[in-house]
Amino acid sequence: MFVKVCGLATTADIDVAAEAGADSIGLVISGTSVRGLGRDRVPVLVAHVPDGVVSVLVVNDTPADEAARIAADLGFDALQLHGRAYGRPEFEAAAGIFPRLWRATALADGPDTRVGALGEEVLLLDSPKAGSGSRWDLSLLDAARPEGRWLLAGGLAPGNVAGAIAAARPWGVDVSSGVESAPGVKDHGLVRAFVTAAKTAPPVQPFDASARP
């Protein structure tokens, strides 16, 4: 099971997530998110991500081409364009600068749920209000379940991630608010517990560690 821990804010957060076994960490640049980082802080953090852990720049209100340049300049492994503001034109503009794109959306928005539909290598399905910790109706996946590299997000926490994996059968999971002691503040014990719970959940899809995005 591929595990991404998102919204990290310190080098200690990164160390804990990596040591716990997370496959990926997300750093957020946003003017609207409590987890948004000032751009002056991002270079130090992304440089601190160890080899073998996928670093993802997450944006929801930055123009796609600008975000792609930031991702390229700072050495991120992938760029996650999150929300309805990013459609095909935005993905095409970003791909011309930085080709490793992830797409994050909510089923409530009626997206194309085919992984790669907009040129992305990973699809993330979240709750309608990203970062809120709100769970969503996983039964909606019965009519629109993706195949391939897709991550489940939205209201996940150490105590419910195994059940969510069993219900949704994703390739991976993404967590942010579910491992926090306060909005934007990661609880290192919860981070460790989440990664362990996700990694030890009964396997639902084969995971080839050598084929990480």
Image (cartoon, grey):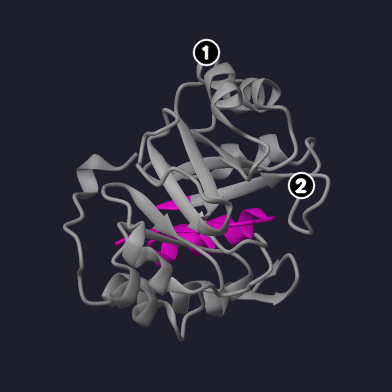
Q: Which residue is drawn at 66% across and 25% down?
A: 70
Query: Crowdedness of circle 1 by 10 Å Cα count: few (<14), some, many (20+)?
Result: few
The image position of residue 99, as x and y in percent, is 46, 22
Viewer-side residue, 198 vs 192: 198
The image position of residue 195, as x and y in percent, is 41, 70
Task: Identify the secondary structure beneath mark 2.
Answer: loop
**Range of the magenta residues?**
1-24
Indicate the amino acid at tag 2.
Leu
Q: Which residue is drawn at 54% across and 26% down?
A: 88
**On screen, residue 103 above or below 209:** above
119 left or right, relative to 200: right
31 left or right, relative to 158: right
Residue lying farthest top?
96
Viewer-side residue, 59 vs 134: 134
Q: Which residue is drawn at 62% across and 60% down?
A: 12
User: Hey, which quadrant is residue 38 in on the image?
Assistant: top right
| Residue labelled with disc 1 | 96
* Viewport quadrant of the N terminus: bottom left
| Residue labelled with disc 2 | 37
* Viewport quadrant of the C terminus: top left
The image position of residue 159, as x and y in percent, is 46, 86
* Dot 2 or dot 1, earlier in sequence: 2
